[in-house]
Amino acid sequence: MTAPLLQVPCCEPGRSWPMGAQLARLRECDGLNVCVFAPHAQAVVICLFSADGQTETARWRLPERAEDVWTGFVPGIVAGQLYGLRVDGPWQPQAGHRFNPARLLIDPWARALVGPLDELVVRSEPQSETTTQPEPTDNAAFVPKGRVIDVEAELQAGARITPGPATAWRDTLIYEAHVKSLTRLHPGVEPEHQGSYAAVSSPAMLAHYHRLGVTSLCLLPVHLHLDERHLIQKGLTNFWGYNTLSFFVPDPRLASRAGEGVDATVRAEFRQMVDTLHRHGIEVILDVVYNHTAESDDHGPTLSWRGLDNAAWYALDGNGHHLNPTGCGNTFDMGQPRVIQLIMDSLRWWVQAFGVDGFRFDLAVALGRAPELGRNFNPLATLFTTIAQDPVLARAKLIAEPWDVGPHGYRTGQFSARWHEWNDRFRDTVRAWWLGHNCTRGQFARRLAGSNDLFQSGGRPPAASSNLITAHDGFTLADLTAYERKHNEANGEGTQDGHDHNFSANGGEEGQTTDPVILQRRARWQRALLATLFCAQGTPQLLAGDELGHSQHGNNNAYCQDNATTWLDWAQADEALTAFVSGLARLRRSHPALRHPCWFTGEPVDGAAYPDIDWRNASGTHPHGIEWDIPDGHLLACVITVGERAAPAQERVMLIFHANPELTSVSLPGGIWQLVMDSAQGWVTAEGEPARLFTGRIDVQPFTVLMLVRSLTSQALPAP
């Protein structure tokens, strides 16, 4: 197999930076510098193609190898040239080597890819590869080709994007959404833009974000991805996109002009989306998948990294098999410097060329599995320390999904400074409190106060807790309160997929119902859950569609449903619920007590007359001993007294969380208290509305959150 590539003529010597194929000027000549990481290879060739990508026009072997990187320079190449790579070397699967010169490979650093993706997985997966012989069929006809682009021009275009608002974490409200799901059915979006980047920043969507008080839009993966073979065989797709093929290319299928196949148009549309959102005060955070690639397990397709140098790019066991802490078939070797470089170059590219403001790292524990520690998690692993010192990423928001499925993969609260984390303990505890599962006052109080057991010892503030009730992965809010078990039959996996422990409830009947009592109970649960999210310390994250009452009919793993299951049905939106969420966001902005930057101590702060937080029972006494630990005491109140950015406290805020099914009466501290939110009624006070004032006690409906405020500055209110 080696001879054909060794016989290819060499191009001129190149230089070993930057990685990939980029325009350069060497020895007073313009052309293409090629830099490929393939330390175990015997030959690396760049293949040039015609403008339609169907005809190979030239092959050039890279002449030099230094520091495990092959380099070469092809004079005369200009922007627009299509190309791919071929690599030869040993075929020794037991040692992890799977070189196959019959495979045209995608450059991991390609900034643009051209060509259809429909047949790529099916026709690229091995049909006859054994431990002794690779698949001999040439795949060039159906592999996307890299397009050489002017990187400097792209960076200049990125520099013209309006800078992001750099919203402080304590003021942040994250809205998690899928580009297509969010906008595909929105009647206010022009039909030709529905489901696209352009739709995300359309006037109709901007109005919705502002109504909700959204400061940061977190988009599910937009990196170019592939569908897995088993989904293709079922006529399904990987709709969510957690199966990356290129870490630099925005997926053209999410662009309004995707059918035209113009990669420059796709990049321009993405930039326009980011620029428009920035001009309206909204940050863009990307959900990124650097823990694995679309090449899957040992039997997956050879598309890029596997063919370039499987044993160098991926984490393998002693028999050449892929380690799989991601559950997706493979994982990058995070001890390999060029892997770190690929991820860092990608992160910087999205910040500099596209203006994004932050990243949510999928299965982030896999990114910190250090080979020198037996591939156990290290919060100071190479990638994390590299990100920490990088000036380009200095202002980027960093959010970890703090687990993977490998050994000891649950690491919530164990990431280092600057990192914020999805807090699944907040999610599960709050669900349990409201939906009838075992939960104590102490557990609930700890989550309300920012989860100091997880984040305080690491020197991080309460905002480090990324609080969520629901996310793309799991039940929607409507389904959380309507289904006791998952209903994932449409996924074609025998309902074996998706979480089984959801802390959900159905109110008395599984799924859809017309029973008014059940519907009222579900509505109260939903509003109470949302009120808890917005009133808790930490950074709230709202799943797009929860404010509309969107249901996926009990499917808690709808990753493969590109249809009305996941597309938000704006025509059937629950307007009252949307208005309630809008009111909750307004309360959070208006009252510093709901977004305190420091940890509560339970003691007076700066000479104040009251403790920063005062926990109370219905009778007005303080819980103690067993009252914190019994699982049936589902009523808790607290009074928060804090100032705004070191200023003296202007008000006291009382929150009452009543998760029992009976009406109860709660004692109020001394003074006159104004009710500003009642989740049972779906009511939040509005400007100019007559004040609802209470003293002494207040009646609380079942499954209700109340918020009351007492001014400390008004002379009209008596002292406590």
Image (tube, rainbow, N blue to C red):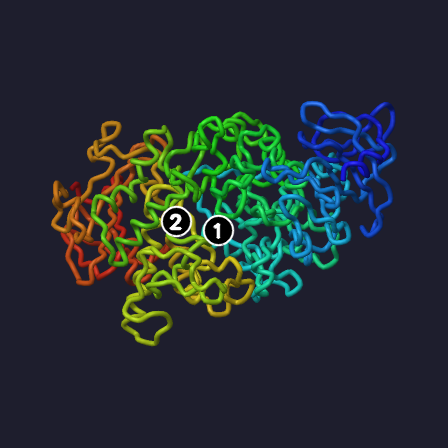
Image mark count? 2
The reply to whether residue 161 is in sight is no
Give the labeled residue for mark 1. 176
The reply to whether residue 384 is in sight is yes
Please state, as top left, top right, bottom left or bottom right, where the N terminus lies in the image. Answer: top right
Q: How many other residues sit within 10 Å of disc 2, few (<14), some (14-19) or many (≥20)?
A: many
Front residue of 213/533: it is: 533
Image location of residue 476, percent across then percent down: 41, 59
| Direction bottom: furthest residue | 514
Image location of residue 493, percent across then percent down: 47, 62
Query: What label does residue 468 carry, if any?
Result: 2
Q: How many other residues sit within 10 Å of disc 1, few (<14), some (14-19) or many (≥20)?
A: many
Indicate left or right for 610 with 214 as reference.
left
Q: Secondary structure at mark 1?
A: strand
What's under tag 1, amino acid-wise? Glu
Front residue of 500/711: it is: 500
Image location of residue 434, percent across then percent down: 27, 56
Residue 409, compared with residue 630, is above or below; it is above
Query: What residue is drawn where x is 23% and y is 38%?
Result: 613
What's under tag 2, amino acid-wise? Leu
Of the two numbered discs 2 and 1 on the same chain, state the one appearing first in sequence: 1
Indicate left or right for 415 with 122 as reference.
left
CB atoms of marks 2 and 1 within 8 Å: yes
Indicate left or right for 51 with 231 as reference.
right
Query: What label does residue 610 carry, if any?
Result: none
